[in-house]
Image (tube, rainbow, N blue to C red):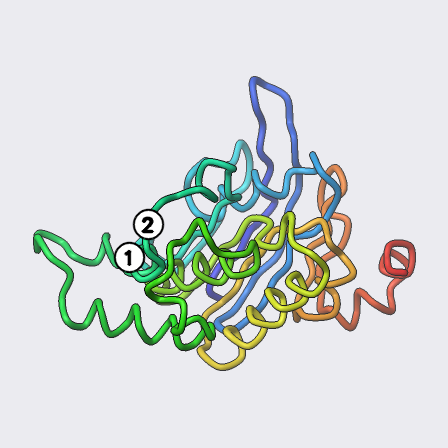
Amino acid sequence: MLITCKNVSFAYEGNTVIRNINFSVESGDYLCIAGENGCGKTTLLKGILGLIKPSQGFIMSTVTAGQIGYLPQQSPVQKDFPAGVYEVVLSGRFCMRGLRPFYSRADKEIAMENLERLGIADLRNRCYRELSGGQQQRVLIARALCAAQKVIALDEPAAGLDPLATAGVYNLLEKIARKTGITVIMVSHDIENAAKYANRILHLQQGQFFFGTAEEYIHSDIGKRFLI
């Protein structure tokens, strides 16, 4: 298993906010951590990334921090970032530079490969803040992929997008997992799209409500309650 959570709980100031999480993901999985706002999705994601420690249980991982590309929720200030698309994507290789003062030829080739993979190579000379919301998300996913060797983790990557752009992001992530073998771990409250594109669902509701394949979720009593 690539990442395994065993009886994991998280607490803030002595109050448990999420409890008894048990699941595993493998290479090439597309896991959606779904649930309503405030159920602990982002907290769990940060725990998986090693940004916070569980109050109980443990998280086992064969992935190092340098093998993960992370896309947090985008703030209004970030959406107005005055940089070129190519520079934003290339910056995903920053941690790979080590002591080198400049990006290598390989870094630049990887940046262009990800621009092409996400279908935005034609935007490489555009200013990031002039793009549509859907285009910006593709740029940020390309940037995260520049850092990702085994896992790409995303927190509400389709937030604020229209239905067409949202479907495009979910579909794109499904292709990344299937074609590259990179594991996708995505936080979303959009359970309907999650069940359509992800292959595994972890549904939180004051703890672990469901974990299994998307097909199992669709046919479960829980899935029938939340899917239209």
Q: How many marks?
A: 2
Residue neighbourhood size for the residue with mark 1, other residues' Cα within 10 Å, grouped as few (<14), some (14–19), many (≥20): some
Nearer the observer, 1 or 46: 46
**Circles 1 and 2 in contact, beta carbons < 8 Å:** yes
| Rendered-image quadrant of the C terminus | bottom right
Q: Residue at x 30, y 68 (%)?
A: 111
- Pointer 1 residue: 87
User: What amino acid type is highlighted by mark number 1?
Assistant: Glu
Counting from the top left corner in percent of width and height, residue 89 is at: 34, 60
Q: Residue at x 86, y 54 (%)?
A: 226
Q: Quadrant of residue 91?
A: bottom left
Nearer the observer, 151 or 24: 151
User: What amino acid type is highlighted by mark number 2?
Assistant: Ala
Counting from the top left corner in percent of width and height, residue 35 is at: 73, 47
Query: Disc 1 to disc 2, how far (Cα)?
Result: 7 Å
Q: Nearer the viewer, mark 1 or mark 2?
A: 2
Q: Residue at x 33, y 76 (%)?
A: 113
Q: Residue at x 43, y 60 (%)?
A: 139
For this view, does 119 lie left or right of residue 114? right
Element at label 1: helix
- Pointer 2 residue: 83
Counting from the top left corner in percent of width and height, residue 217 is at: 80, 65
Q: Quadrant of residue 64?
A: bottom left
Nearer the observer, 91 or 193: 91
Residue neighbourhood size for the residue with mark 2, other residues' Cα within 10 Å, grouped as few (<14), some (14–19), many (≥20): some
Compared with 53, 63 (above or below) is below
Compared with 11, 78 (above or below) is below
Counting from the top left corner in percent of width and height, residue 160 is at: 65, 48
Element at label 2: loop
